[in-house]
Amino acid sequence: MSSSLKRLVPILDGTNHHNWAVLMQLYLHLQDLWEVVGGTHRMPAALAQSPTPAQTTAYNEAYAVWNTIDNKAIGAITLHITACLRHYRGANDTSRTFWMNLKTAFGTASMPAVYVDFKQVINIKLTGGNPIPDMERMATLFGRLTTNSLTLPDNLQALLSLPPRWDSIAQLYLQHTDLATTLTFANV
């Protein structure tokens, strides 16, 4: 379990919550642990006063199953956050509470995280070879910037996506008379 976790999910450091959360959720799905973290498999309700022996046995069995899954989820999450963030899990917190604490603390993009995305997008250097992987990375970053209220105009996105090696193509393309509608990231 931990070897595939190591390969599939990055370490949460506080700046990469969005990417980490998507991959961690997928990993937890693969391990049949997400239902506890996601809240669909909840801790059994407390027993009523003076339960019958059958009710006590049923509760203990249900709680043991839930507790095992919850502890596995807590372990998986804890293994992939930096040590300085482990305090977001209280001593008696469930995996769901732990997940929500991390989401509350890091789920909304901070200005430094937006800046990191912006710097990444302006520093992508297309090689002139197969542009698809780099273009997909740029589209992802443009989407994240838009989600975080920093929308770059489509024509600026297009200009950022033209590699220096393609300057001759860019010059021909930029000679269009209607750049307001034709100079777009999608068209490039």
Image (cartoon, grey):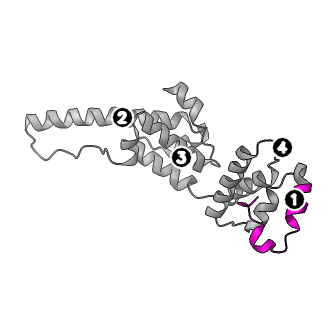
Number of the label disc, if any, that sits on residue 170:
1
Q: Are marks 1 and 4 in contact (CB under 8 Å)?
A: no
Q: Amino acid at mark 2?
A: Ile
Q: As displayed, is residue 166 above or below residue 70?
A: below
The mark that comes first in sequence, 2 or 4, is 2
Q: Amino acid at mark 1?
A: Ala
The mark that comes first in sequence, 4 or 3, is 3
**67 relative position to 9: left or right:** left
Q: Position of residue 143 (x, y in %)?
A: 64, 58
Q: Position of residue 123 (x, y in %)?
A: 81, 51
Q: Position of residue 71 (x, y in %)?
A: 39, 34
Q: As displayed, is residue 65 above or below residue 108?
A: above
Number of the label disc, if any, that sits on residue 69:
2
State the extent of the magenta-drawn residues as a range: 168-188
- Residue visible at 43% across and 40% down in the picture: 91
Residue 47 among magenta residues: no
